[in-house]
């Protein structure tokens, strides 16, 4: 089977292990969804068709900004707003939009979680309530624990900024892809840091949601990592030996970040 289309980040479902589906678009319209778990242990071939389409406007572009955007979209789209990377910058709860009032009301003036996760190390993060557990899966987390719930994005961002003094907010993606992380007592870490929060932020932590454990469809973790990029290698092929985060693993060595190639037009042979 050969299917052609523009890449988007993989869709996920958390069951006993994560189930992955790869959507392929006809520019801006989804027209294929490939269930990848069925192909673990089988040969796949991905060919770059030398075309990239902006995921916001659909126009052909030579260079990608952010994740699949043209420069204009990256500068103007609310999906690349500064408050995406830095939630503490959001002001929509005050009625002030950074880029798009309706979009920010829909996405940022909604309940958000602050969480601890175990990827390559313990890290702190922020996500909308509706993005759980997909947010944790996209990061390759093996554990995740909600430590606070806020009514809007900025408040969650302020907690995250405070906790960055104690935890990282970045994932060591290479280490994440080489092994399952050692178990961390996230409840213990939560109890420690809540005591450090100022009262105006501590009030959001009176919530209990059970810890989430995440397992991935991986035959064996690679000892070494060879990161592949479609603009450098038009054809990537091999045996699909695992999927973690938004990465495909081939031949226990090569890895391809699917999300980083959003908008790229490919043909995939399965």
Image (cartoon, grey):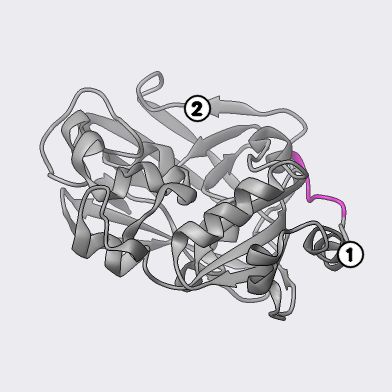
Q: For residue 208, what is the image quadrant?
A: bottom right
Whether label 1 touches label 2, CB < 8 Å: no
Report helix, strand or loop for mark 2: strand
- Mark 1 or 2: in front is 1
Image side of residue 106 versus residue 249, left or right: left
Residue position for label 2: 228
Q: Nearer the viewer, residue 230 or 212?
A: 212
Residue position for label 1: 188
Question: Residue 163: horizontal and vertical position, in percent?
Answer: 70, 49
**Residue 73: mark:** none
User: Which of marks 2 and 1 precedes in the sequence?
Assistant: 1
Q: For residue 14, what is the image quadrant?
A: bottom right
Q: Nearer the viewer, residue 33 or 175?
A: 175
Residue located at (74% from left, 73% from top): 211
Residue located at (30% from left, 49% from top): 79
Question: Residue 181: horizontal and vertical position, in percent?
Answer: 81, 50
Q: Which residues are magenta?
A: 178-182
Q: How many marks?
A: 2
Would you say the magenta stretch is mainly helix, strand or loop? Answer: loop
Question: Residue 78: horizontal and vertical position, in percent?
Answer: 26, 49
Q: Mark 1: give few (<14), some (14-19) or many (20+) Cα within 10 Å.
A: few
């Amino acid at each position: 089977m050969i299917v052609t289309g523009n890449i988007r980040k993989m869709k996920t479902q958390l069951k006993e292990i994560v189930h992955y589906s790869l959507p392929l678009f006809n520019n801006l319209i989804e027209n294929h969804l490939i269930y990848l778990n069925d192909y673990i242990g089988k040969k796949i071939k991905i060919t770059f068709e030398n075309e990239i389409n902006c995921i916001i406007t659909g126009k052909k572009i030579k260079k990608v900004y952010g994740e699949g955007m043209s420069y204009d979209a990256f500068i103007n789209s609310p999906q690349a707003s500064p408050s995406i990377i830095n939630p503490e910058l959001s002001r929509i709860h005050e009625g002030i939009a950074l880029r798009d009032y309706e979009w920010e009301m829909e996405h940022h003036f909604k309940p958000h979680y602050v969480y601890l996760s175990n990827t390559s190390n313990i890290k702190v993060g922020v996500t909308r309530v509706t993005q759980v557990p997909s947010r944790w899966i996209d990061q390759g987390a093996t554990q995740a624990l909600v430590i606070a719930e806020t009514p809007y994005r900025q408040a969650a961002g302020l907690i995250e900024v405070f906790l960055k003094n104690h935890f990282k907010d970045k994932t060591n993606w290479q280490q994440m892809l080489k092994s399952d992380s050692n178990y961390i007592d996230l409840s213990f870490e939560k109890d420690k840091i809540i005591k450090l929060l100022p009262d105006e932020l501590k009030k959001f932590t009176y919530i209990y949601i059970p810890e989430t454990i995440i397992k991935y469809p991986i035959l064996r973790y690679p000892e070494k990592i060879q990161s592949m990029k479609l603009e450098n290698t038009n054809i990537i092929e091999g045996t699909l030996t695992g999927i973690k985060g938004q990465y495909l693993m081939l031949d226990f060595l090569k890895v391809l970040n699917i999300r980083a190639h959003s908008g790229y037009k490919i043909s995939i042979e399965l």
